[in-house]
Image: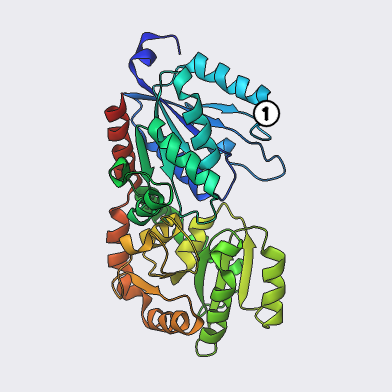
Amino acid sequence: MNNNTTKKKIHVVFVLPSLLSGGGIEMHTLKLLRHFNREHFHFSLITLFERPSLPSLYNTVPHDVEVYRLHFSGPYNGGQWKALCVILKRICPDVVVSSMFSANAIVRLLKPFFSYKVITREHNTYEEKKLYHRLIDCVLAFFSEIILAVSSTVADFISKQAWIKREKIIVVHNGVDCEAIHMFLKEKGEGEVYRVRNEIALNDNEKIILNVARLKPQKNHTLLIDAFELFVQTHPLHHLVIVGNGIERDALTAYIQKRGLQRKVHLLGYRDDVFAWYAASDFFVLTSKREGFPNVGVEALAFGLPMISTRVPGVDEFLVDDKNGFIVASNVLDLANKMNSIAEDPKKYEENCKKTAQLFDIRKIAKAYETLFYSTV
């Protein structure tokens, strides 16, 4: 930190509530950190809350990124506010990038005491925000040089929700590492596909429909299971694989058993080999009630998998009906019908899927962030 070379670089600090495994915000931030230009930027990462009982991603942070882990337990935790101020004073960031309400509020409240610029990120349409949250967002927006939204729908939503001028909000989509996916398929794909298919005891002619999402009400897995139950009546060789963990796991396990689908629907929990499951699958289905810009959908496209999704924010910015998948209404019959359509020939969508994913390659997204960093200092 004391050498002249480092001082000439723009110091960017990312502030996140936590670094839990399986979180889209956390995983996307780490992908960005791996692809930023180190000649012009230096990076640090601050997390505010500890969740020791849950798996984390700290061991995957790039080695040259300084990590500071705080232990906030609430807004009145004076010791942690002091610790954060000590860190910020010592590292003197030029730009602070934050995500989620708590982190966004904290870095903007502290801005008057430091010289950094603020980029706050909005990742979803949080309809449950209370009036006081919205008022805080509205007032603190004046302390953000840039408010970044992951999709146009999210930008429009937060503009209306928190009374923020739309022109203050810039859209930068999430990205996927297309090169890493290409290398995985080239070097490991065949063997990994064989391994995971054996894990769930599939015969050679059986097929996989994939969903990757945390098991929580927002992801609407019962709709997916109900549609699959209808679909599998005419497509008995298909299996549904759901990758992800969460509070709904026990309820979904019971629901699957109640429907008599325990041999056809596989709840795998959190996996660090998700690339293998993409590679082994025929197509991808997302049934969320709410999203901002679903990373997993673009990742599926990068593997050449057509995607079926409910109409949630973000998907209409990369998914085109009968080109790389379908957008459906949130009802069982429509979803099952589109699953039938895709299942007839999923390979015909492969080239379009990969072309779409290239538009969101993480290297392009990292450069867009770097342009914003330059614009603020």
Residue assigned mark 1: 77
Residue 10 screen position, x and y as percent: 35, 22
Q: Which of the two residues, 208 or 146, is positioned nearer the viewer here?
A: 146
Image point (51%, 81%), residue name = 332
Image point (44%, 49%), residue name = 123
Q: Which of the two residues, 161 or 71, is positioned nearer the viewer here?
A: 161
Considering the image in quadrants, where does the N terminus appear?
top left
Residue 29 screen position, x and y as percent: 46, 41
Residue 196 vertical position relative to residue 52 in the rendered view, above or below:
below
Residue 363 vertical position relative to residue 285 in the rendered view, above or below:
above
Q: Amino acid at mark 1?
A: Asn
Residue 178 screen position, x and y as percent: 35, 51
Image point (46%, 58%), residue name = 291
Image point (67%, 76%), residue name = 256
Answer whether residue 269 is visible to the viewer in this image. Answer: yes
Q: Which of the two residues, 263 or 285, is positioned nearer the viewer here?
A: 285
* Mark 1 crowd level (few <14, some 14–19, many ≥20, 10 Å Cα): few
Answer whether residue 31 is visible to the viewer in this image. Answer: no
